[in-house]
């Protein structure tokens, strides 16, 4: 119950899906929760739910592609909670599913702005506060598509590969500050983003489409947000004090083939 007791955790893209599960599990383990998202109603509702659990939680409207919004919100989190110990860079979008030669510059840039620059901006502006706290943990949500190709969504693959290497490099840069940086690589997790991806790929029968994706995983099914959230709890906690610069793959065996 107290695996991250008293730690202030920022979760980007925290209103729904994996981010929401991370917020609930970290709060259940004693953390103070700062939720960053652009989905205001869902974000406020989540924080009310966390408060009802007895957790300290607050929502900030933040587009992680905006450095000014990121900086202002992180500074405000530090003022509100008094310190910051954990950053979970979860915000991300899938982008268009087209062959590379058909993608427009704007379509490419939007995915990189959220998935890559968002991680950069949040990391950049949280470092001073993690140093002030004597160390901390940054958990970057990549994907199995940051490890292997699948012949689809080129901007997403590129962005998640970037997040993997950013994590390793920052792990080396900030190790002397006792700031650990790791990436998490989910397989397909049943979230609004994955449902939207399937619909965008032309699926009309969602039950059939979901079963098809289930079979991509040797365990025979997609994951749930909690499967990822518990991995994030581990990386946020002192249980992982000797873990940095590595990938935590939670994928039902997807990349083991």
Image (cartoon, rainbow, N blue to C red):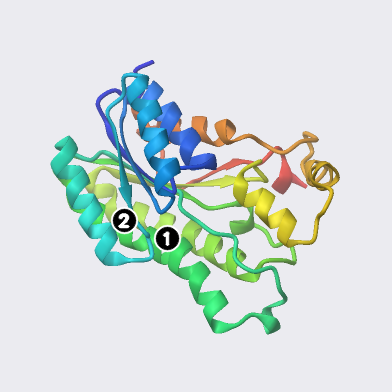
Tag count in the figure? 2
Which of these two is toward me, 162 or 98?
98
Using the rendered view, name the quadrant where residue 85 is placed.
Answer: top left
Q: Nearer the viewer, mark 2 or mark 1?
A: 2
Provide the secondary structure element on which disc 1 rests.
helix
Is any part of residue 202 visible from this angle?
yes
Where is the N terminus found, in terms of image quarters? Answer: top left
Q: Residue at x 44, y 69 (%)?
A: 113
Q: Which residue is mark 2?
A: 123
Instruction: Estimate how packed mark 1 is, as few (under 14), some (14 to 19) or many (20 or more) residues with alpha carbons within 10 Å.
Output: some
Q: In this rendering, would 20 be left or right of 196?
A: left
Residue 180 is situated, as x and y percent measured from the top left of the image, at 34, 44
Q: Which residue is mark 1?
A: 166
Q: CA distance from mark 2 to mark 1?
A: 10 Å
Instruction: Estimate how packed mark 2 is, as few (under 14), some (14 to 19) or many (20 or more) residues with alpha carbons within 10 Å.
Output: many
Provide the secondary structure element on which disc 2 rests.
helix
Q: Are marks 2 and 1 in contact (CB under 8 Å)?
A: yes
Q: Residue at x 29, y 48 (%)?
A: 175
Say if 219 sits above or below 155 in the image. Answer: above
Q: In this rendering, would 146 be left or right of 244?
A: right
Which of these two is toward me, 54 or 184?
54
Say if 212 sits above or below 202 in the image. Answer: above
Q: Residue at x 55, y 36 (%)?
A: 228
Among all residues in the image, which is located at the extreme top?
Answer: 1
Using the rendered view, name the quadrant where residue 251 is placed.
Answer: top right
Residue 130 is situated, as x and y percent measured from the top left of the image, at 22, 45
Q: In this rendering, would 3 be left or right of 82?
A: right
Residue 158 is situated, as x and y percent measured from the top left of the image, at 57, 68
Q: Residue at x 69, y 84 (%)?
A: 101
């Amino acid at each position: 119950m107290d695996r991250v007791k008293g730690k202030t955790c920022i979760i980007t893209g925290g209103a729904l899906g994996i981010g929401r599960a991370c917020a609930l599990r970290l709060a259940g383990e004693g953390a103070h929760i700062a939720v960053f998202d652009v989905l205001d109603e869902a974000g406020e509702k989540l924080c009310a739910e966390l408060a009802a659990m007895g957790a300290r939680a607050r929502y900030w409207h933040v587009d992680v592609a905006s450095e000014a919004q990121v900086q202002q919100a992180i500074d405000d989190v530090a003022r509100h909670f008094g310190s910051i110990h954990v950053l979970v860079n979860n915000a991300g979008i899938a982008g268009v599913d087209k062959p590379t030669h058909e993608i427009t510059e704007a379509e490419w840039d939007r995915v990189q702005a959220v998935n890559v620059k968002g991680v950069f901006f949040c990391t950049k502006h949280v470092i001073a506060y993690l140093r002030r706290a004597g160390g901390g943990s940054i958990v970057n949500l990549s994907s199995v598509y940051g490890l292997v190709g699948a012949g689809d969504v080129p901007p997403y693959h590129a962005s998640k590969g970037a997040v993997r290497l950013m994590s390793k490099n920052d792990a080396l840069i900030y190790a002397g500050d006792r700031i650990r940086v790791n990436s998490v690589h989910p397989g397909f997790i049943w979230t609004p983003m994955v449902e939207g991806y399937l619909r965008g790929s032309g699926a009309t029968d969602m039950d059939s489409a979901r079963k098809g994706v289930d079979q991509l995983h040797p365990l025979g099914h997609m994951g749930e947000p909690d499967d990822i959230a518990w991995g994030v709890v581990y990386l946020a906690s002192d249980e992982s004090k000797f873990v940095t610069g590595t990938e935590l793959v939670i994928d039902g065996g997807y990349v083991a083939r």
